[in-house]
Amino acid sequence: MKRLLSKLLAALVLAALTVAAWQFRFEHAGPPLSRPFEPGLPGWEWKGGKGREANPDVSGAVTIARNLKAGDPAAQVERVLGTLNDVRFLHVELDAKWDEVVQDGEVRWATARAIVYGRQKDGSAVFPHDHGIISAYGSAPWHHEEAVFDLVPGSGELRFALEHWGSHGSMAVRNVEISMVRQRAWFRPVASGLVVLWVAWAAWWVVPALGRWKWPRAVLAGCALVGATWFLVFPQPRFCARTLAGQFQLGSPIPPPPVVPKPPEPPAPVAPAPVEPPVAVVPVIPPPVAEPPPVVAPVPPVVLQSPPPPPAPEKREERAVDEGIRRLRDRFNFLHVVAFGAFGVALFGFARPRVWPIAAVIAFASEALPNYQLHQAWDRGDLGDLLADGAGLALAAVVVAFARKWWRKRYAPTGHSHSGDSASGKPLLG
């Protein structure tokens, strides 16, 4: 019992450190790219839908609504963010609510949503696989939404859009803040250290369930547990980071660069008017000497504090493989069977099938955590995914049991059943 409590306490400490590192992962990397909604929506383009004249309301919120049966067109409101080639991470946060939003048909994205996407010079749009901060279904009260998008190369001119492609309902948004962020310098080494500690904890957890070569197998089983948690549970979605507790701690915001006033130009010297000589013949009198122009004191230079140097750009990562995996995952529950089947083979092969409860926890968390982060309710699709995950784990247990039985039957010792080595000199599994 004491050993179990020690393991649970260590897991709680590691979880707290992981959450803290995740919440402090990013920091501001530039001035804000947006400002609160103002009358007339300056900086925003109302591309379609009704309600242009009524937005924003007195609370500063913009509401987009649609009733397809009444013939309402799709609503679209956009803000151009610019071509941010040297920016990898984009932080978006806002307050939102929606009422009775109904999806149009079987198209999953045909609903009320808030997205980030790119526009190419030829007018074509570039949509990263995870580009939405909101996909509204049903009703939800006012709440806070926040995400950091990992931008893909070649996005073009980035835009933030509020859209309503659903058949019914409304969505209201206010306090939109968009800014450039970057990872803190310490995040990668800290994350690597946490991964090592989690592998050590997982090996410590499964080692009582192991037989021979227990520590090498425990480390491999720990790698399987941590790898499955990272790729199947945390973080999700893959291309936009969501908070785990509260809001991201980005530090002090970076103000926009100061506007340098133009120094005043010195006044031009005015030459005196020439004096005409009299008509009468008089002795030649030299013309009066023109007074020299007044000496204008030079304008002192305006001393301004130079803005901080821009941060070093972060390289955007190619995500073609991850994009393909995520598309398959969205289309086929079969991928759930394959993913958790591979995880189960690795875990049950290195450990024992008796560690199935922790595999079941990972399967449940793979559906629960995204729903929590995206403020979505459970639906039949989530239950279908859980059944597919369980089928993959069950299939893996059967495969491992069959492989062990086959191995023992082929290489079992004939006369020395108590020996740890087989007659052929090959070790036994398990």
Image (cartoon, helix red, strand yellow):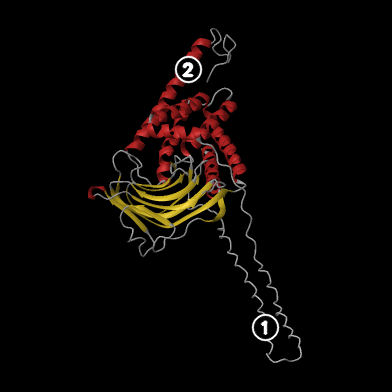
Residue sitting at 31 percent across and 57 percent down?
51
Q: What's the residue at 55%, 43% (across, down)?
A: 14
Say what secondary structure mark 2 lies in: helix
Disc nearer the start of the sequence (2/1): 1
Residue under the point 36% across and 65% down: 58
* Nearer the observer, 291 or 8: 291
- Is residue 408 shown left or right of residue 139? right
Q: Nearer the viewer, residue 327 or 343?
A: 327
Answer above or below: position of 413 versus 187: above
Give the x, y percent position of residue 362: 45, 35
Residue type at mark 1? Pro
Q: Position of residue 206 (x, y in %)?
A: 52, 31
Q: Closest to the observer: 323 or 384? A: 323
Crowdedness near tag 1: few (<14), some (14–19) or many (≥20) residues, C-alpha within 10 Å = few
CA neighbours of label 2 inside 10 A, class few (<14), some (14 to 19), many (20+) = some
229 in relation to 258, above or below:
above
Residue under circle 2?
Answer: 403
Image depth: mark 2 or mark 1 in front: 1
Q: Taking the image as drawn, is residue 301 in sight? A: yes
Per the rendering, the mark at residue 35 is none
Percent of width and height locating residue 400: 47, 21
3D distance between C-alphas at marks 2 and 1 = 114 Å
Give the quarter of the image for residue 218.
top right
Residue 24 visible somewhere in the drawing? no
Q: Which residue is mark 1?
A: 274
Q: Position of residue 353 (x, y in %)?
A: 46, 26
